[in-house]
C-alpha cells in the first residue's frame, strides 16, 4: 500500500469513527440549546415544594402549583460591559388569573458558556463542548465557602452532560433532541424521614435540568433538605424544592 493511499485510508477510518459517535458528541453551538431572541418565551407548570412546619422532627412537605413564563425582554450590558439579555418571569396561579412580573433575571452567552444570573447568583448552565460525560463546576461564581455564606449547599456541584439527543415526554408534549444536565445527587446521614427517633444530621441535595434544541430549558427538578438533630440550637427540617415542566413556547 502506497503512503498516499494509507493516509486516505486512515482519514476515512477516523471520519467514520467520529460519525459513529455523534450520539455522544455535538459540534453544535450552545445557543442551539439556549436561544436568546427578544420576545422568546417558555411557559411552565411550577410545583413549589415547601416545608409546612419548619423545625419539625418529622418531614412535612406541601406542594403549591403555579404557572410561570420566562420572556426574553431586551438586551442590556452586564457589570463587565458584556452583551446580555434581560429575562422577565411572569407568574399566576392558573390560566384564569392575570400574569404578574415577579422576577428579573439575566443571561449572557459568552460563546463558550451560558451564564444565568438569578437573585445575584451566577450559574454556568451550559458550556462547550456538548458531549456526554463532560463536566464543569456550574456554581463556581457563587461564594459558598465562608462561614456566613447562605449558599454553602451550592458548593462543589459537578454539572455533567448526559443523554444527548434524547426524546422525552413532558405531559402531552413530546420533545426531541434534548440533553440532560445532571447537576448534583448527594445524600448524607439517615434518610428515614418517618422515624421520630432519628437524631442524626442528614441532608439531600438533588438538581437536574433538561434542555431542548431550538427551545431552551424544558424541565428542571431541584430538591434540598437538611435535618439538624434535637441537640443543636436549630433542630428539625428545612429546605425547599422546585419542579418546572414546559407546557408551551414560541
Image (cartoon, rainbow, N blue to C red):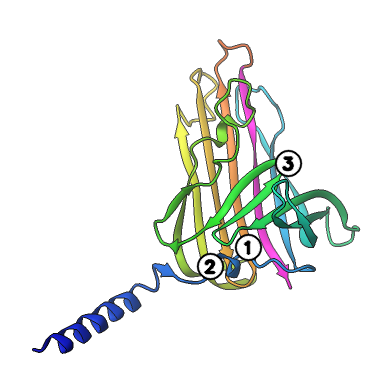
In percent of the image, x 71 and y 40: which residue is there?
120
Query: Is there any visible trace of residue 233 in the rendered image?
Result: yes
Q: Nearer the viewer, residue 110 or 62?
A: 110
Comes first in the chain, label 2 or label 3:
3
Q: Position of residue 182 (x, y in %)?
A: 49, 52
- Give, as a single range, the part of the protein colored magenta: 235-250
Q: Is 6 on the left or on the right of 188, as rendered?
A: left
Query: Is there any visible trace of residue 171 in the rendered image?
Result: no
Q: Nearer the viewer, residue 111 or 212?
A: 111
Comes first in the chain, label 2 or label 1:
2
State the CA–CA distance, disc 1 to disc 3: 21 Å
Q: Position of residue 32 (x, y in %)?
A: 59, 70
Q: Is residue 21 above or below residue 136?
A: below
Frontmost of labels 1 and 3 is 3
Q: Nearer the viewer, residue 31 or 171?
A: 31
Q: Which residue is mark 1?
A: 218
Q: Secondary structure at mark 2?
A: strand
Q: Position of residue 212 (x, y in %)?
A: 58, 68
| Quadrant housing residue 37 | bottom right
Residues at discs 2 and 1 in contact (Cβ within 8 Å): yes
Q: Which residue is mark 2?
A: 178
State the CA–CA distance, disc 2 to disc 1: 9 Å
Q: Is 237 one of the magenta-colored residues?
A: yes
| Quadrant housing residue 40 | bottom right
Q: Secondary structure at mark 1?
A: strand
Q: Which residue is mark 3?
A: 119
Q: Is residue 13 above or below residue 74?
A: below
State the CA–CA distance, disc 2 to disc 3: 27 Å
In percent of the image, x 50 and y 22: which residue is there?
201
Q: Position of residue 227 (x, y in %)?
A: 56, 25
Q: What kind of secondary structure does the magenta stretch mostly adopt?
A: strand
Amino acid at each position: 500500500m502506497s503512503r498516499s493511499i494509507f493516509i486516505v485510508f486512515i482519514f476515512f477510518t477516523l471520519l467514520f469513527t467520529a460519525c459513529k459517535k455523534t450520539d455522544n458528541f455535538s459540534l453544535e453551538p450552545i445557543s442551539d440549546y439556549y436561544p436568546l431572541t427578544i420576545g422568546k418565551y417558555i411557559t411552565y407548570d411550577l410545583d413549589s415544594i415547601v416545608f409546612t412546619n419548619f423545625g419539625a422532627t418529622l418531614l412535612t412537605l406541601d406542594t403549591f402549583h403555579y404557572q410561570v413564563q420566562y420572556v426574553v425582554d431586551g438586551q442590556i450590558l452586564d457589570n463587565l460591559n458584556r452583551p446580555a439579555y434581560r429575562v422577565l418571569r411572569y407568574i399566576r396561579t392558573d390560566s384564569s388569573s392575570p400574569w404578574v412580573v415577579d422576577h428579573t433575571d439575566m443571561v449572557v452567552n459568552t460563546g463558550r458558556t451560558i451564564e444565568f444570573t438569578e437573585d445575584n447568583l451566577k450559574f454556568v448552565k451550559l458550556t462547550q463542548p456538548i458531549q456526554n460525560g463532560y463536566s464543569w463546576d456550574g456554581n463556581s461564581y457563587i461564594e459558598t465557602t465562608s462561614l456566613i455564606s447562605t449558599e454553602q449547599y451550592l458548593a462543589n456541584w459537578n454539572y455533567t452532560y448526559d443523554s444527548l439527543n434524547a426524546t422525552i415526554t413532558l405531559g402531552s408534549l413530546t420533545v426531541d433532541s434534548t440533553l440532560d444536565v445532571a447537576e448534583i445527587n448527594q445524600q448524607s446521614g439517615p434518610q428515614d424521614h418517618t422515624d421520630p427517633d432519628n437524631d442524626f444530621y442528614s441532608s439531600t441535595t438533588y438538581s437536574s435540568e433538561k434542555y431542548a434544541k431550538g427551545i431552551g430549558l424544558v424541565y428542571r427538578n431541584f430538591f434540598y433538605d437538611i435535618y439538624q438533630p434535637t441537640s443543636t440550637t436549630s433542630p428539625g427540617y428545612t429546605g425547599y424544592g422546585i419542579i418546572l415542566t414546559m407546557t408551551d413556547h414560541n
